[in-house]
Every structure is written in C-alpha cells, then in structure tokens.
C-alpha cells in the first residue's frame, strides 16, 4: 500500500507541479478540475453507486466547478460561503465523530452523496483561489495536508 501511495504521489506531482508553477492559475485550475472529477467519481463508488452513475457524478461536479469559474466566483472573496463551509465542516465532522464508523450506513446515502460533492466543489474553489493568491500560500496549505495524510497513514498502520 505504501509503494502505491508513493508512486501515485510521484505521478500526481509530475502533473501538478508544471501546472502549479505556470505564470497564471488557468493550468492549475484545469488540472484541479480533472482531479475533482476523479474524486467525485470515487465518492460515488464509495457510496455504493454503479460505474455509470459515478461517472455522471464526476462529470456533474466538473461542470459545477466550470460553471462557478465561468460565473466569476474565483474572482470574488466569498466570505459568507467560506464561513458557512467552515461551519458545516466542523459541525458535520463533529456529528460524524459522534456516530462513528458503525453509524455511517444510517446516514441517508443521498445526504452523504450531496455533502461529499459539495465539499469537493468547495475544495476546488478553495484550491484555485489559493493559487490565485500565490504559489507559496497554496504550497503551505498542500504541505499541511500532505504531512497530515502521511502521519495519519503511519499512525493507522502502527495501531493496526
């Protein structure tokens, strides 16, 4: 599993880094569209949907992100949306911790699906806006996520 994670990270970095360091945000936004589409497809599969519907969910999420881009949301500060998204993340996370893993199937599948797809849409907006602020700002966020992911992996392996 670790070997697969490392290889995946290398491939993704080979794609992501040129787009990240391009002089404007457009290549990065396009790469992120593809990655968010793949994440939405995977979210559909994780929630028990078939291949066709999962592909549809990926396409739908990419279209939502593209529509947001076309409508100019990337150029707006979106303070209210970030506040609501942050509150939903904290409150939703607390609720999920309360029900724990056995409680996951009791959450309606449609609610899980919509919540996950909205989280992916907000993640795309956040990543691209962070890149528009600056490469160093975005990299600091990505490093925090990567470090947390690596340590969570090793902590899970150590407790298993």
Image (cartoon, helix red, strand yellow):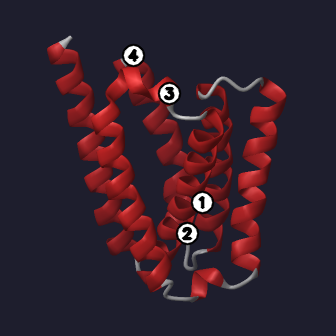
- Dot 2 lies on which element? helix
Q: CA distance from mark 3 to mark 4?
A: 29 Å
Residue under numbered circle 4: 1
- The reply to whether discs 4 and 1 touch (Cβ–Cβ < 8 Å) is no
| Nearer-N-terminus badge (4/1) | 4
Report the front residue among 4 and 130.
130
Query: Which quadrant of the structure image shows residue 72?
Result: bottom right
What crowding class fits label 4: few (fewer than 14 Cα within 10 Å), some (14-19), or many (20 or more)? Answer: few
- Dot 4 lies on which element? loop
Residue under numbered circle 3: 106
Q: CA distance from mark 2 to mark 3?
A: 30 Å
Q: From the viewer's perspective, is residue 18 above or below residue 23?
A: above
Report the front residue among 3 and 91.
91
> Mark 4 against mark 1, which lies toward the viewer?
1
Residue located 69% across and 64% down the image: 65
Report the front residue among 136 and 85.
85
- The reply to whether discs 2 and 1 touch (Cβ–Cβ < 8 Å) is yes
Residue 93: x %, y % from top left: 34, 47
Residue located 66% across and 23% down the image: 48
Q: Which mark is residue 125?
A: 2
Q: Which mark is residue 121?
A: 1
What crowding class fits label 1: few (fewer than 14 Cα within 10 Å), some (14-19), or many (20 or more)? Answer: many
> Mark 2 against mark 3, which lies toward the viewer?
3
Query: Which quadrant of the structure image shows residue 66?
Result: bottom right
Q: CA distance from mark 4 to mark 1?
A: 28 Å
Q: CA distance from mark 1 to mark 3?
A: 24 Å
- The reply to whether discs 3 and 4 touch (Cβ–Cβ < 8 Å) is no
Q: Is residue 136 left or right of residue 69?
A: left
Q: Is residue 61 left or right of residue 94?
A: right
Residue 87: x %, y % from top left: 36, 65
């Amino acid at each position: 599993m670790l070997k697969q994670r490392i290889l995946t990270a290398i491939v993704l970095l080979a794609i992501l880094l040129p787009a990240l360091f391009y002089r404007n945000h457009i290549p990065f936004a396009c790469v992120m569209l593809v990655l968010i589409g793949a994440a939405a497809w995977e979210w559909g599969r994780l929630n028990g949907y078939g291949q066709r519907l999962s592909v549809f969910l990926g396409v739908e999420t990419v279209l939502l992100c593209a529509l947001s881009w076309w409508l100019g949301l990337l150029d707006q500060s979106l303070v209210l949306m970030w506040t609501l998204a942050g509150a939903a993340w904290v409150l939703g996370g607390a609720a999920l911790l309360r029900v724990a893993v056995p409680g996951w199937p009791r959450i309606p599948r449609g609610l899980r699906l919509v919540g996950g797809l909205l989280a992916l849409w907000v993640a795309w907006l956040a990543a691209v806006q962070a890149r528009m602020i600056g490469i160093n700002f975005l990299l600091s966020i990505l490093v925090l996520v990567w470090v947390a992911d690596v340590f969570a992996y090793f902590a899970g392996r150590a407790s298993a």
